[in-house]
Image (cartoon, rainbow, N blue to C red):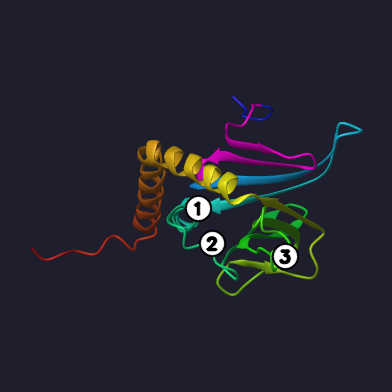
Amino acid sequence: MSNEGLLKYAIVEYTTTKNFCNVYDALSIERLEWEVVVYDRQKRAHIDRVTAYIPVTRCKLLVHHVVSGSAQQPGWAVEVFGGSVRDDGIESRLFKVEYDPGDGRFARFPFRLSISSGPGKLTATNGISPDGKPTTQISMRFPAEDFLGICLEIRDYLLIHQRDIEAVRRAAQVERFEQRRSNGAGNRSVAA
């Protein structure tokens, strides 16, 4: 059975007059999918959209910083680089959350989420880095209380689904072990 066309579960759906921010369950790959959409209210249409898949551990760190209050200082930021290899090339993504009150100019909306995507290249460690300027870049600002609420929702969701996360990790470990074993790396005898 194909999963194409199935509705993704949104942990968070946050809407302003110009943007949507959605956070979707992607625990089967040990990630959360963050999406930011630019929306035209007059035309009732999405103008632009960008997504990033953030590892669960990085999401937990982001949530911890926001919930503990340590994120609420000018200059604080979290960046996560990533991307994917596809048939039509390599896509690089940058996810960034920062606390930027802008000398009081954005005091009511100090948290800024930015996601950018564009061409990428493989690094020596099989990571993905940007290869030129991003083709899509969207930023969205949040009031401190609203971003705290988003982080609390994510925290609670991850707490409830910790067993699912562990099952994904366990399956990945078993797969790596079986691959090593089938390649002969696990055939060493161990003295008792």
Q: Does label 3 or label 2 sit earlier along the sequence?
A: 2
- Magenta residue span: 6-29
Q: Residue at x 49, y 39 (%)?
A: 153
Is residue 154 in the magenta section?
no
Percent coordinates x, y for residue 158 in the rendering = 43, 42
Q: Is the residue under label 2 in contact with that under label 3 (CB below 8 Å)?
A: no
Relative image position of residue 154 (x, y in whole percent): 49, 42
Callout 3: helix, strand or loop? strand
Q: Residue 95, located in which quarter of the rendered image? A: bottom right
Q: Name the residue carrying label 2.
A: 72
Residue 1, picture quadrant: top right
Residue 120: mark: 3
Q: Nearer the viewer, residue 131 or 108?
A: 108
Element class at badge 1: helix
Q: Residues within 10 Å of mark 1 (few under 14, many from 20)?
A: some
Going by the numbered disc 1, the residue's amino acid type is Cys
Viewed as shown, does residue 102 lie left or right of 58?
right
Q: CA distance from mark 1 to mark 3?
A: 23 Å
Q: CA distance from mark 3 to mark 2?
A: 32 Å
Number of other residues with Cα within 10 Å of mark 2, as a class: few under 14, some 14 to 19, many 20 or more: some
Residue type, label 3: Gly
- Kindly identify which numbered label has been placed on residue 59: 1
